[in-house]
Amino acid sequence: MKIKPFKGIRPPKDLVEQIQSRPYDVLNSEEARAEAGNNEKSLYRIIKPEIDFPEGTDEHDPAVYEKAAANFRKFREKGWLLQDDQELYYVYAQTMNGKTQYGLVVCAHVDDYMTGKIKKHELTRKDKEEDRMKHVRVNNANIEPVFFAYPDNLEIDGIVARYTATAPEYDFTAASDGFRHTFWIIRDGGDIRRITALFEAMPAMYIADGHHRSAAAALVGAEKAGQNVNHRGDEEYNYFMAVCFPANQLTVIDYNRVVKDLNGLSDETFLQKLAEDFEVEKKGETVFKPSKLHEFSIYLSGNWYALTAKPAACNDSDPVGVLDVTLSSRLILDRILGIKDLRTDKRIDFVGGIRGLGELKKRVDSGEMKVALALYPVSMKQLIDIADTGHIMPPKTTWFEPKLRSGLVIHSLT
């Protein structure tokens, strides 16, 4: 893997909490407008600049992208974002529920993405790619990092541990998620060279979160290379910003489904059809959370049900077929409910497990949805096995928490 340090564009210590934000894709325009409030320093002004326009403004309007660039320039002119004077690596730690994961902020190489050394496990949508490509182009920067996993490496762990034993550059608990975010700077040239060499020996890295941002950053880099008649290969646009975590520190949590109707079936008929492939046990009002592979939870008309897939229904020899998201898509969403394409069908929505099963109950009890389906999460091993074999997971399979905060550091393409 080819990585490099970079001259990060960062907030002064005393402004970081005003500037930092959640990622652009985990909240809508209304939520971003509410979180930003009257804070003119909020990064939402750059990553969701439609909040500076009247409500209802199309976030894909060219004027909105131009506003992102204008706000980015403003942040730099006012000293709210300052560029480091040397190329550095950074350590970014996140603490959730007493567990801390330690990531290295680096620049990954566009060619490694294009040639498949940076491995993906999800398909991307062209419209979402193009949206982020426009954002990268207009700002000439990667404003937000992508989230990678790398094979565990004890020497890298040791280098990171030396820095995390010192006073951090940033240290705050975000009000919107309640998680602690801590940030250190690696300035020592020897450590920087050694980290670069250790990554160079790795066979692959894996996209955990940010498939569209990764695609957009790599495609814009390749685009710039094609436009530059004097392209050498060492220009800054050949790289994009990523936070890389050792795979053994990451946790994938459940990513659940809610469906608007039963495809014309009564509750009784729906449950009968489920019983063809699952052992169905009614739990009543007691919340049931799946605790192992091939165990599912259904919430329907005020009652929870435990589902256990019958052995004949499973295909455990297939790295994708073994996933519960595949099993439930095939046997419940497609066969019974008639939902063929999870990416386009308007009858289904997805709920990250961070919201808890109470969110599923709430959306069904409100009448917005008819039935909820909770799944056991995939493991990092499954994710890596699928990526290594060139397979693709079904949409909305993985949910990682905590999410990276945006605005701690930015990478300029020049």
Image (cartoon, helix red, strand yellow):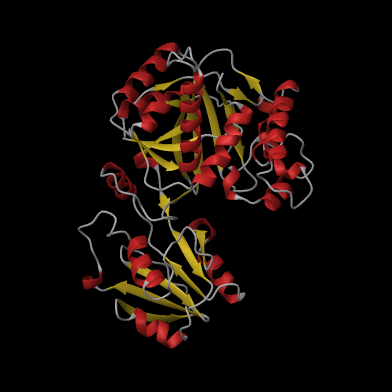
Whole-percent x and y of residue 82?
66, 20
Whole-percent x and y of residue 188?
46, 13
Q: Residue at x 73, y 34 (%)?
A: 41
Q: Quadrant of residue 327?
A: bottom left
Q: Residue at x 70, y 48 (%)?
A: 58
Q: Is residue 375 above or below residue 246?
A: below
- Residue 180 seen in render: yes
Whole-percent x and y of residue 78?
76, 23
Q: Quadrant of residue 272?
A: bottom left
- The foreground one among 146 and 381 is 146
Q: Is residue 111 above or below residue 291?
A: above
Quarter placement of the N terminus: top left
- The foreground one among 193 and 342 is 342
Q: Residue at x 40, y 40 (%)?
A: 207
- Residue 186 seen in render: no
Quarter placement of the C terminus: top right
- The foreground one among 292 and 164 is 292
